[in-house]
Image (tube, rainbow, N blue to C red):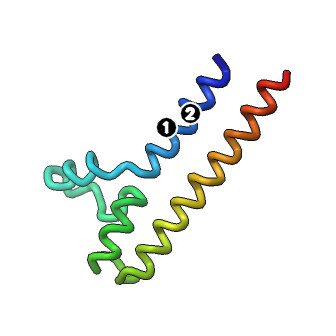
Amino acid sequence: VRGAALLAMLLSIIGSIQLFNEPQVMQTVDKGISNSYTPMMMAMNTSRGILTPKGDGPASAIAIVMALIAGVLAALYAYIERKVNES
């Protein structure tokens, strides 16, 4: 059960990083949701020029940082999974 719980936790964190649709739709109703509410919204609005710094370069940097975070979490998951299976 521990392995399944760790995988569910990893996928939940990565899903939170990639969250886009729900806040984007809710933004039309609630103006309290900013253009940088999630990293995906921040990347899209930066590439559109809505947020500063503007352009594709900063948006690509945001996407690369999100990918690095997901990679680190996946590596951490693999390490913890290996330790759990050894014991």
Q: Residue at x 19, y 50 (%)?
A: 25
Q: Residue at x 38, y 59 (%)?
A: 40
Q: Which mark is residue 36?
A: none
Q: Secondary structure at mark 1?
A: helix
Q: Along the line of sight, which residue is nearer the eye, 1 or 29?
A: 1
Q: Residue at x 81, y 31 (%)?
A: 83
CB contact under 8 Å: marks 1 and 2: yes
Looking at the image, residue 35 lies above or below residue 48: above
Image quadrant where one finds the N terminus:
top right
Looking at the image, residue 87 lies above or below residue 32: above
Query: Residue 58, position in %: x, y?
Result: 44, 79
Q: Secondary structure at mark 2?
A: helix
Residue type at mark 1 is Ser
Image quadrant where one finds the C terminus:
top right
Residue type at mark 2 is Met
Q: Along the line of sight, which residue is nearer the eye, 67 or 21?
A: 67
Q: Which mark is residue 12?
A: 1
Query: Residue 76, position in %: x, y?
Result: 70, 44
Q: Residue under label 2, please give it.
A: 9
- Sort mark 2 into few (<14), some (14-19) or many (20+) by Cα contacts within 10 Å: few
Left or right of 59? Residue 86 is right
